[in-house]
Image (cartoon, grey):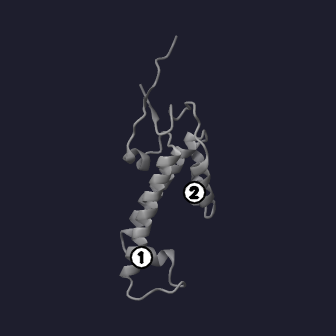
Amino acid sequence: MNTPPQSANISPGPVWALLSPIGRLGRQPYWLSFAFVWVIIGISIRLWFISVPELPTPEDVTAGAFMESNPLFPILFFVLQWFELALVIKRLQDIGHSGFWALLIFVPFVNLIMVFFVGFAPSQEEPNRHGPLPNSYWRKS
């Protein structure tokens, strides 16, 4: 008995790229999405620098001081961390690995290696269990 072929979404949008961990993501949208995340981080750091009354010394610049300076910064960074996790999961699935390995982005210094490794690894050309092509995902029938 033949099973009907699975349908696929081969044109998901930017909301899918940033929010959903389901599917495959090619190298170009991965790097463009990361550029967006890094621009948002840069803007928030710039807002912090212009909001402090005096220029902080390197000893004063801590993650805690940064997060306490504006009550929206912790929320922003949780959202940006989700974006990064979703991007890395989809990219890992695109190169044929389990998205479980994306948890390595929470390990300091390993996260940079992980982001660059999955960013430069080539996509699988054939369909895999996560989608038919890069930048796509399977839909359940």
Kind of residue at badge 1: Glu
Label drawn at residue 105: 2
Residue 125 place in picture, x, y as percent? 57, 34
Kind of residue at badge 2: Ile
Residue 12 place in picture, x, y as percent? 39, 39
Q: Residue at x 38, y 47 (%)?
A: 14
Quadrant of the frame with the C terminus: top left
Q: Which residue is mark 1?
A: 68
Q: Residue at x 44, y 68 (%)?
A: 42
Distance in Å between CA atoms under marks 1 and 2: 24 Å
Horizontal arrangement in the rendering, residue 13 relative to residue 107 (left or right): left
Residue 76 place in picture, x, y as percent? 40, 64
Q: Residue furthest bottom?
A: 54
Label drawn at residue 43: none
Foreground disc of the pair 1, 2 = 2
Front one among 81 and 56: 56
